[in-house]
Image: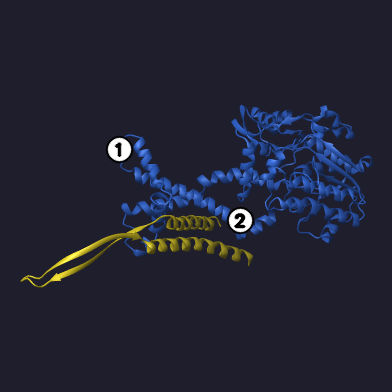
Amino acid sequence: MQTLVAGGTGFVGTALVCELTARGHDVTVLARTPEDADLPSSVKRVACDLLEADTEDVREAVAGHDSVVNLVALSPLFTPSGGDEMHERLHLGGTEKLVAAAAAEGVTRFVQMSALGADPDGPTHYIRAKGRAEAVVRDSALEWTIVRPSVVFGDGGEFVHFTKLLTTPYVTGLPGGGKTRFQPIWVGDLAPMLADCVADPEHVGQTYELGGPEVLTLADVAAAIYTAAGKSLRIVPVPMPMAKLGLTLGGLIPGFPMGADQYRSLRFDNTVGGGDPEANEVRAFGVDPADLRTFESYLASDGGDAGTDNRTSGSRGGRDTDDGPQNSSDADDRVRADGGWTRGVRSLFVGRETLGLFTFLSLAWGLPAVVDIYSAPVFRLLFIPSYLVSMVVYDGFVGLENVTYAVQNAVPGEWAYAWDAGLVVTFYLFAVAAVLVGRLVRNRFGGRRLVESTASRP
Amino acid sequence: MSLRYTLVGGMLLLGLLLAAQALLSTPMVTVEECTATGVAEATTPSSTPDCVRYTERAWGQQLYLFVLGLGIAGLGVGLVVVDRRLVRR
């Protein structure tokens, strides 16, 4: 069977492509940068940006295939670069293009990966876009199947990353005490079910809600992750109104990875039939929910550092392949937001730009007291930035020197250089603030970002 | 890129803080004006200075700092505009 997997270089896509290839399908992946993906050599690759491509481009990619699987997605866990409107543009717009192209090219089977709770009138941009995309698929003349999984975990996935980003070991605050419930399903269990949807006619016209073997709260998930890493965890409930305020305000900051949508999604459970095991439709694929892999067993084996260990554990049949690094085109926004945010905060305090600016301000201020470097008038200009920072931030408008005086008064002893030490600290804080402002401006208005954001779209 | 936007960040931060300081602070200047009355009737002429000191708001300094702050911030904005144009070409 000739199968096109749109988003086939992503987290779920990679596992599905391996599964389909193992079943003898001739697989083509459609992604923005398919050449970077580590996929079986027999897989054909088509570079296509569903946001930018017109229907003709997509038709060209779809032509000659019997079935199409649409896995192209943005994460609901993080605000996508380009804003929440990207959900509508990609999930709905991308699906419309694929469905139109599939119908025009005579494709028979169309498998749409949606999400639990997909609803055109749902509470978040993601859920609404997924709901509208489902409607497009249902209204088509194709032989369609819609799969709505709960959160998916596995190597290269984002669920563990997201939880780690949201929490800290030992003591952590969680919105509402982390009572939001999930039914995580392992990617190695989901991929064979998606492959079944492609091949078996019995799944045509069905919408399946799929979950894992257990219902876990966010607090359970966080505790399991840190327990697997040998660390304890104590949850401190964060009142939901406070979480709402924090995420809503955070969402207004350019580059902040979460926003109001993430708060809204935390208010609703992500379970099949309210967690009723009988409602779990994995049985349609001949699978007993009890046979599915648990989150805990995944963490105990190799998932403690999920995302750094790139082994894919294969299908239900026990295949254990080494697929190498996974290029998550359907997850790259969130992975970038996740790792990028942590690294960004760290580099803000110890990055080259911060330390460089701090060194410049300190030397320009302090060196003239030791070395006569400013005898030439041109060098005197170098003193101006330090002087202005000192004037405005330290002994002027912001008045940080008052902190120095307070410390001086509180701690007994001789403080000959307290004022100067306070000024040096001020230079450092100013450097941190300047780099932060620079990054915000670059992300919001910078010319280079136009190129980066284009490249980051699925 | 990073250096450019570090400079932009520094200029915007410093410039806007300086402008805010100029707006929110009230620098004062003390002026002393003197007039003298001369008496030439005696053998030795003498004069009695009559000086008045008064303090008033230093509008000039405030304006200078405000314009300086906006100028520095404007340089930062200019750098962003140049960056965008260069990238678009």
Q: Colour of chain B?
A: yellow
In the figure, residue A150 lies in which quadrant?
A: top right
* Residue B11 in the image, given as x and y percentages of width and height: 48, 58
Alpha-carbon span between mark 1 and mark 2 = 47 Å
Horizontal arrangement in the rendering, residue A76 relative to residue B59 (left or right): right
Compare marks 1 and 2 and give the one earlier in the sequence. Answer: 1
In the figure, residue A305 lies in which quadrant?
A: top right
* Residue A230 in the image, given as x and y percentages of width and height: 62, 27
Q: Is residue A191 above or below residue A228?
A: below
* Residue A93 in the image, given as x and y percentages of width and height: 79, 54
Q: Secondary structure at mark 1?
A: loop
Q: Which chain is blue?
A: A
**Which residue is labeled 2 in the image?**
A444
**Which residue is labeled 1 in the image?**
A414
Horizontal arrangement in the rendering, residue A165 relative to residue B40 (left or right): right
Q: What's the residue at 35%, 53% (across, down)?
A: A367
Q: Is residue A426 above or below residue A232?
A: below
- Residue A22 visible somewhere in the drawing: no
Q: How many labels were placed on the picture?
A: 2
**Amino acid at pointer 1:** Glu
- Residue A263 visible somewhere in the drawing: yes
Q: What's the residue at 20%, 64% (across, down)?
A: B50
